Amino acid sequence: MSLTTGRPEDLPDFRKPPLAETVLSLQFEPVAGLTTAHVGLLWERLRKQLPVIEEHPPLPAIFEKFEPPSPAQVEVTFEEKPPMPRVWFLNQAGSELIQVQADRFIHNWRKMEGLDPYPRYEPIRDKFRDEVAALEEFLRDEKLGALAVNQCEVTYVNHIEPYSVWERHGEVEKALVMCSRLGSTSFLPEPEDVALRMRFVIPGQNGNPIGRLHAVVQPAWKKSDNSPILILTLTARGAPIGEGIEGAFSFFNLGRSWIVKGFADLTTPEMQRMWERTDG
């Protein structure tokens, strides 16, 4: 199954975006009866495209909540059996993978040196839709029930290199507009580095919140030459917009729009010229 929705005309566009990874994630009610043996059977259906397999600890469930926080409570649970691991199915290059656990199904695209550039969101989304259809068919065949999606997540991980715009992690204001520089007359010097975390509410058509855009900035060093980079991670997370899997993909499209427009708002014109922004 393929979606026909193309790239919206109102989105900012860059010829050389600093994108290092794109993630689409479905979170759903745990599939009762799903075991690692079932995951192995699912892998057999996808093995031709994704021949490499790895095991990792499962991710915790996460929800965007909008009511006032309640007092923290300590809960004690007893597991009758160890939790099912999160299993990765990877292509030979490691540039694309699927992650499977009892309540998650995730598709990752990762930038790899020497491989094709970012294929754009629409082909990644359409490929994931086909993979979700394969998962749904598998669950029907194994009589494990249907997916009950409760949260959807889109993540873009950007590696912002200095180019000729900035040199040190403390010059973050030259890359990101939400950072103001300490004046030359201030007591504090330029910071050694800066880490930031922000949240923005995503409203639905009726004005009520349906999700959030999370923006996280971390200083890092490029592995190839130890040069400084800034990692800007943008995650849109929320409930499906409508029923079923199509409602989930409607949120993916909205979340992607918030990420791209948010990225344009949060980065400086100087950096955008380095990435060759083509619109406006």
Image (spheres, grey):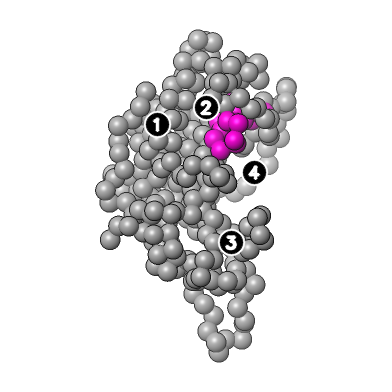
The residue to which callout 2 is attached is 29
Disc 1 crowd rating (10 Å Cα; few below 14, some 14-19, many 20+) is some
The amino acid type, in three-letter code, at marker 4 is Gln
Earlier residue among tags 1 and 2:
2
* On screen, residue 104 above or below 153: above
Distance in Å between CA atoms under marks 2 and 4: 22 Å
* On screen, residue 108 above or below 191: above
**Percent position of residue 241, x then y:** 35, 36
- Residues 58 and 108: in front is 108
The residue to which callout 4 is attached is 73
The amino acid type, in three-letter code, at marker 3 is Ile
Distance in Å between CA atoms under marks 1 and 2: 23 Å
Residue 2: give its label. none
The residue to which callout 1 is attached is 126
**Percent position of residue 36, x then y:** 66, 20
Quadrant where the C terminus sits is bottom left
The residue to which callout 3 is attached is 229
Query: What stretch of residues is rendered in magenta?
Result: 85-103
Residue at image position (44%, 53%) is: 17
- Name the element at disc 2: loop
- Name the element at disc 4: loop
Distance in Å between CA atoms under marks 3 and 1: 31 Å
**Percent position of residue 108, x then y:** 53, 37
Distance in Å between CA atoms under marks 3 and 4: 39 Å
Cβ–Cβ below 8 Å for labels 3 and 2?
no
Residue at image position (63%, 57%) is: 222
Earlier residue among tags 3 and 2:
2
Disc 4 crowd rating (10 Å Cα; few below 14, some 14-19, many 20+) is few
Distance in Å between CA atoms under marks 4 and 1: 41 Å
Q: Position of 79 compared to 188: left or right?
A: right
